[in-house]
Image (tube, grey):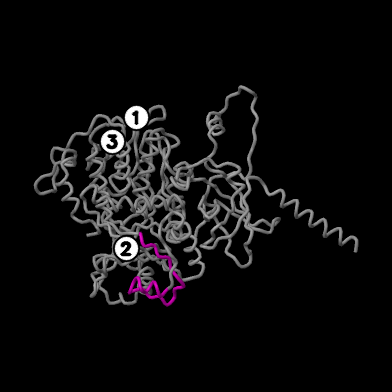
Amino acid sequence: MFLRLLADVRWRGADPKWRSVACCRSASGTAESQPVPLPAQAQVVICGGGITGTSVAYHLAKLGWKDVVLLEQGRLAAGTTRFCAGIVSTARPVSIELKMAEYSNKLYQQLEQETGVQTGYVKTGSVSLAQTQDRLISLKRIASSLTVSGIPCEIISPKQVAQLHPLINIHDLVGAMYVPEDALVLSANVSLALATAASRSGVQIHERTSVSHVSVQKGRVTGVETDRGHIKCQYFVNCAGQWAYELGHSGEEPVNIPLHACEHFYLLTHPLKEPLANNVPTVVDPDGRIYIRNWQGGILSGGFEKNPKPLFTEGRNQLEIHNLQEDWDHFEPLLSSLLRRMPNLEALQIMQLVNCPESFTPDMRCIMGESPTVRGYFVLAGMNSAGISYGGGAGKYLAEWMVNGYPSENVWPLDLKRFGTLQSSRTFLRHRVMEVMRNLIKQHQGLSVPQFPFLPSAEAFFFFPQGMEFVGQEALLEQKQNGVYKRFTMFILEDHDTDMDLWPWWGEPIFRNGRYVGKTTSSAYSYTLERHVCLGFVQHFNEKTGEELVVTTDFINQGEYEIDIAGQRFQAKAKLYPFSSLFAQRRRKDEVELSGYQRE
C-alpha cells in the first residue's frame, strides 16, 4: 500500500547490475548476509536514495560521471518518497520551478521504456479551482507563463469543470485552470527506475549504509565516514531529505541546511461503486486548501492545514519513515473541504488516514547548490511537498552544476547561499515552518510575494588605472568582445488603465514584435509618469534554430513591445536608460500651464 507497489522487488531481481551492488538477502528476505564491500574511493558520494538522490545519480551518469556511489541508510525510496501522492504538476508561478516540473514530467514519461520498471505514469491533466475572482486572476497569470513556456493550458468555466470531473460541486466556483499535460506516477517506482538506469551506467548503490559525517580538509570535502567504513571522495551530495539538517551539522565543518519536518495528512478511500477512470484529472482547490486525485478507483485527498504540526524537533528522527499516528481531529477541516467539494463522497468508506513527514524550508523554495563554507559539498533537499514534481529537473540542474561548474538555467532563487546562520536555528525553523506550510498551496497557485536578487536599474561605471587588474576583469573583457545575451530593460505601459486594468506584479511575459523574449522581474506604479513601469530581461533567439543571439542596443530600441498581464497584452515602450525625455516633456507641459495661469 501507500502507493509503493511490489515493482521494487521485481526490479532488484530483474537487473543484474543491481544484483552485483545491492546487499545480498536471505531466502526469507528479512535478514542480510555478506553485504557487498564499499569502494575505498569514488569521485562522488551521494547520501539519500529517494527521488532527489537517485535523480542526481541518474543525471551524473548521463553526463559521463560514473564513478559515483549512492548510499541509503534504509531501503531505496523508503523515506518521504514512499508516501508521496505522486502528482506531477507544472502549474508553478516561479519560472525555475516550472522548468524543473516540466522536465520531470517529460523524463518520467519515457523512463519506463528506458528502464523496464513500471512507473505508473498516467497523463491525467489537472484542474485548479477558483472560488473568488482574485484566485481566478492569479490562475490567469500562471496560465500566461505556462503558455509562453509551451505548456498547454486554458482557463475554463465551472460548467467545463463539471464535464472534466463528474464529482465536483461547482456551485461556488467562478472558473478554473486546466493543464492537460499534468500526470500521476508511482513515486517510489520512479525513484527505483532512476536507480536502475544509474546502476546500469556504472553507479554503485548500497542500501543499509548510514553516513555518520563528512571529512573536510582545508575547506574541501575529502571523504565520507559510514557505519561500514570510510570512502575517499572529491564531492559529496546531501540528498538526505528530512535528515539533511542533522547530516549537515554532523560533519567536521558544519553546513547549514535550513529545513524542518511537519506532519502531512492524506486519506485513501475504497473504490467508488462506479470506479473513477484512470485519466480523471487531479483537482487542486487552493481556497479549500486540498488536492484530490484518483487512486485505484477511489480517492486520495490531502491538503495543508492552517495549524501545521512540526516533527522531530528534538534531534535525529527515525531511520525509515512509517505511517505516523492518525489525527482525525486535526484532519477534520480538510475533510470538510473535501466533502463540500465532492458531496457524493459522504457515504464512501475510508480505507486509511496516512500521516507522513514532509520537510519544508523558510521560504517554501527547495535548497540546491554548493555550500559556501565547504567546497565540493552539494545539497539538494527541502522539496516542500513537491519532490516528485521537481525531482527530475532538480537532479538534472545539480548534476550540471557539479560537472560543468554551473547549471543550464538560472537557479538563484533555489541557491543554498540565500540563507544565513539565523535561518538554521532549530527554534526559528520550528516556528517558521508552521507559518509557511499553511500558505504552501497558495504559494503554488501564485498568491505569494516574489524574491529576486538585487538588479540595478541603471548602469554603473567604474574607472581603474590602466594596467590594473581586478576581480571580474576577464569576464568583462569577454563580454565586451562577444556581446551580451540578456539585457535588463525598462518598460512603460502605454495603453494601460490604472483604474480598470489588472496591475503587473512580476513574471509577466514580454513580447517583441509578437514573439516571446523574456519576463518581467518587478514592477511599480510611477507617480511622476502616472503609469506603470516594469523591469525585465530581454533575450534574442533565432526564429528557425532557437539559437541564443547577442542582444544589441538596436534590437532593444527597434522593437514593438507588449506585456502580457493575466492573458491580456498591453503595449509598452522599452528603454535601456531612464525616461529622461518623458520627464522633460512633463516639465515643459507644467511650465506652459503655469505660464498661462500667470498671464491670466
From the top left corner, tell me how far across and down residue 95 is, in percent.
46, 51
- Mark 3, residue position: 68
Name the amino acid type tagged 2: Thr
Residue 222 is tagged as 1
Span highlighted in magenta in the image: 158-181
Q: Residue placed at 53% from the left, 31% from the top?
A: 478
With 435 as the anchor, is 563 left or right in this view? right
Placement of the N terminus among the 4 image quadrants: bottom left
Counting residues from the start of the chain, the first of labels 3 and 2 encountered is 3
Tag 1: Cα neighbours inside 10 Å, few (<14), some, or many (≥20)?
many
> Type of residue at label 3?
Val
Q: Secondary structure at mark 1?
A: strand
Vertical comparison of 393 with 91: above or below: above
Q: Pointer 2: what residue? A: 124
Looking at the image, tell me whether mark 1 or mark 2 is earlier in sequence order.
2
The residues bearing labels 1 and 2 have C-alpha atoms spaced at a distance of 46 Å
Position of the C terminus by quadrant: bottom right
